[in-house]
Image (cartoon, rainbow, N blue to C red):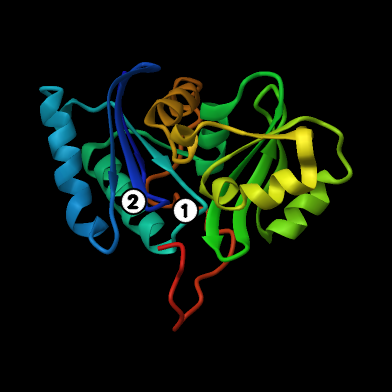
Amino acid sequence: MLTLAIDSSQDVCSLAIGRDCAVVAEYHFAHKMNLLRRLLPNIDNLLADCSLSKSDLDAVILGTGPGSFTGLRIGATTAKSLAYVLGKPIAGIGTLDAMAHGAANGDSVVCPMIFARVDEVYWSVFDSSGERVRDYAVSTIGQVLDYFSKDESQVLFCGTGARRNWEVISANMGDAASIAPAWTDYTRGAALIDLGVRRIMAGDVDDAMTLTPLYVRKPMVGKVEVSD
């Protein structure tokens, strides 16, 4: 099974080609206001580097967020259009799920965080086996720390939200908290492919017409989105 994975929920976009659960190629690029112009050409370049074309794809995997509203809309439209035009299955994978999957060490609770705006993060919690144990949310760092104040588990934090607020987290939680390497701050295509292919092979796929990003909160009309 040849798959294309796309996650455009953050300011670094992740693209990957996978064959079954193995990564064939993976590409990350930083963008600001030009994701719409750059996404399809970068997908074409990635496929060309693998001597492939869009028609060779068997499925599409989409990182559904949460994250940048604009980035999510662009990525979702691109992934859904490809799946629909090619007549191939599509599977949506939560960005926080993929981040936790990529950072997990098998010993600690994992808390992936995506920077939302000053003092706010998108986050969730996964147990040491990788199962999500808390719903997706957007909260202040104080609210996240309040959640963990009732838990004595070792917590592995990862993501841009954790790195930006690490000084506060470590001061509050001490040795109970650790932070994953910086290369786990963004979604890894390998994690998206592994999780997405498992869904597709189990027959658990989404409808390309109705699949929607996980926004967590509604866009603020007339205000600049800091996470973009």
Residue at 44% from the left image edge and 49% from the top image edge: 211
Crowdedness of circle 1 by 10 Å Cα count: few (<14), some, many (20+)? many
**Looking at the rendered structure, which numbered label has been put on residue 7?**
none
- Tag shown at residue 75: 2
SS assignment at label 1: loop
- At horizontal 18% and vertical 47% (from top left) the residue drawn is 40
Instruction: Tell me the number on the disc at residue 213.
Output: 1
Residue at image point 71% right, 20% down:
107
Crowd band around label 2 with a 10 angstrom C-alpha radius: few (<14), some (14–19), many (20+): many
Determine the image quadrant of residue 14: top left
Q: Does 164 appear above or below 21?
A: below
Eyeballing the image, is 162 above or below 202? Answer: below
| Count of marks overlaid on the render | 2
* Secondary structure under the numbered disc 2 in the rendered image: helix
Q: Quadrant of the C terminus?
A: bottom left
Q: Is residue 1 left or right of residue 64?
A: left
Q: Is residue 202 above or below residue 122?
A: above
Q: Is residue 94 left or right of residue 177?
A: left
Expressed as whole percent of the image width and height from the top left, the position of residue 91 reads 43, 36
158 vs 46, nearest the viewer: 158
